[in-house]
Amino acid sequence: MAELIDLNGIFVDGDWVESKDQDPDGEVRLVQLADVGEGYFRDRSNRRLTQEKAVALRCTELRSGDILIARMPDPLGRACIYPGGSAPAVTVVDVCIVRVCAIEPRWLMWALNSPQVRGEIAGYQSGTTRKRISRGNLAKVAIRVPPLAEQRRIVAVLDGLISRLSAGEKNVDLARLRVAALSAAFFDSIESQLSAVAAVPLGGMLAEPLRNGHSAPASADGRVRTLAITAVTQGRFIDRFTKLTSADPDRVKDLWLRPGDILIQRSNTPELVGTTALYEGAENWAIFPDLLIRVRLNEDIVPRFAALMLKSPSARRYFRSRAKGLAGSMPKIDQRTIFEFPLRVPARETQMEMVNRADEMAGVIERIDEAIGAVERRSANLRMSLLADAFAGRLVPQDPNDEPAAELLARIRAEREAAPPKQRARSRRTKKELPAPPTRVTGGDYQQEALPL
């Protein structure tokens, strides 16, 4: 990448801005990792800090047209163009900022999202639990640079084709919203039907006291299969969402799952805390971890009905409102919150009738979701095919009259070498806009050139 940065460009990481540095009333936007999409700016976050704090931290102010590269998943290395905004903006340290003037920024952004470059980035990733790539390793990634005129031809074609794909993807998003509305309408009808039934605490329906699980380290020779919290998030109790642990069998003998057990996440993100799933598998297949609370009900209530109501929008709102946690930590609910959950319990026949209606609705939604998923996969594959063709020289014609890329890069290098060295009086800087490091240009006078990114 350094060889593409001209005298007025930058190639730097974002800034280390901690929670204590932020201010919801600040004038400066703090762009987050979640804002960086694959080829588009997602605009999801709303973090801010004051102008005074941004100056004190020597933050790099973003400009419209800057390329933002995500140094963490998912996917690793995705890039977009910052579109600018009404307020000044900076970004976080896990986002790399690239500003180029001598080459086409949108071409470089699309190149970074191409399968060829994405594969190179994967080769330089590091980390065990969560992958990342350093800016130093980003600089090692090779990219083939065509002439500037060809870059612009590639951008013109890609922008047109991908904008059509994006329009189709928006229709898919609308379809998902309609599915969510269909589900919400179903629960509204259920709750309306139950409005005349008096609510009672869930704790009054228990066959056993609520129970937290137990978490032990994973072990290759472990004998106790333990659920991962993902099993409840996805509602799928399969071996892939478990691990063998070194838990003491005597200590966990009361934690083995039985059909009809309801599991509730006691800690997760604000959107997922309180997520519920019903276990209907084999007895004693696995135990559950500490982040889950088990609910075992008496015979007055059908477990499938209870699980259905615990998944309703009103239940989700209840759990979110009762969740507690320090800023920056995962919100949590306790056993008391679950015990006090208000539940309207009709006769068993009515419970089963509602469960059957829910099963029919779930089948319809599942079929719609499968169709939507197929469209999304086709769209993603087509996008990758377009990018692969674009950066393999197959999307637009090559013109022998174009100025070779080597000449362009040599000119960038000459301008940089002719510039006086930057002063190192860091205390006078208010922005971290540093010059690119010394670079080299390789190759001769030819149309395409392999360069370190």
Image (cartoon, helix red, strand yellow):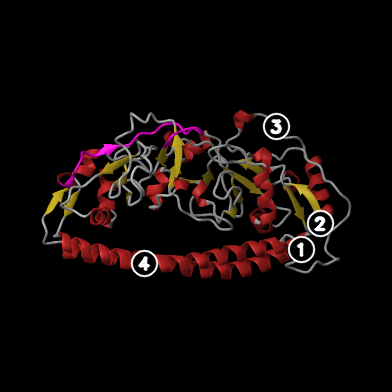
Q: Earlier in the sequence, mark 3 or mark 1?
A: 1
- The residue closer to the viewer here, 415 or 378, is 378
Magenta part mainly helix, strand or loop? loop
Q: Earlier in the sequence, mark 4 or mark 3?
A: 4
The amino acid type, in three-letter code, at marker 1 is: Gly
| Magenta region includes residue 207 | yes
Q: Position of residue 442 (x, y in %)?
A: 84, 46
**Badge 3 is on which residue?**
423
C-alpha separation, residue under disc 4 versus residue under disc 2: 53 Å
- In the image, the segment drawn in magenta is 205-224
C-alpha separation, residue under disc 1 versus residue under disc 2: 9 Å
Tag 1: Cα neighbours inside 10 Å, few (<14), some, or many (≥20)? some
Q: Position of residue 1 (x, y in %)?
A: 71, 46
Q: Earlier in the sequence, mark 1 or mark 2?
A: 1
User: In the rendering, which numbered label is found on residue 363?
Assistant: 4
C-alpha separation, residue under disc 4 versus residue under disc 3: 67 Å
Q: Position of residue 104 (x, y in %)?
A: 70, 57
Q: Given this view, does label 4 or label 2 mark the residue nearer the observer?
A: 4
- The residue closer to the viewer here, 291 or 452, is 291
**Badge 2 is on which residue?**
448
- The residue closer to the viewer here, 110 or 422, is 110
**Eyeballing the image, is 168 above or below 82?**
below
**Badge 1 is on which residue?**
393
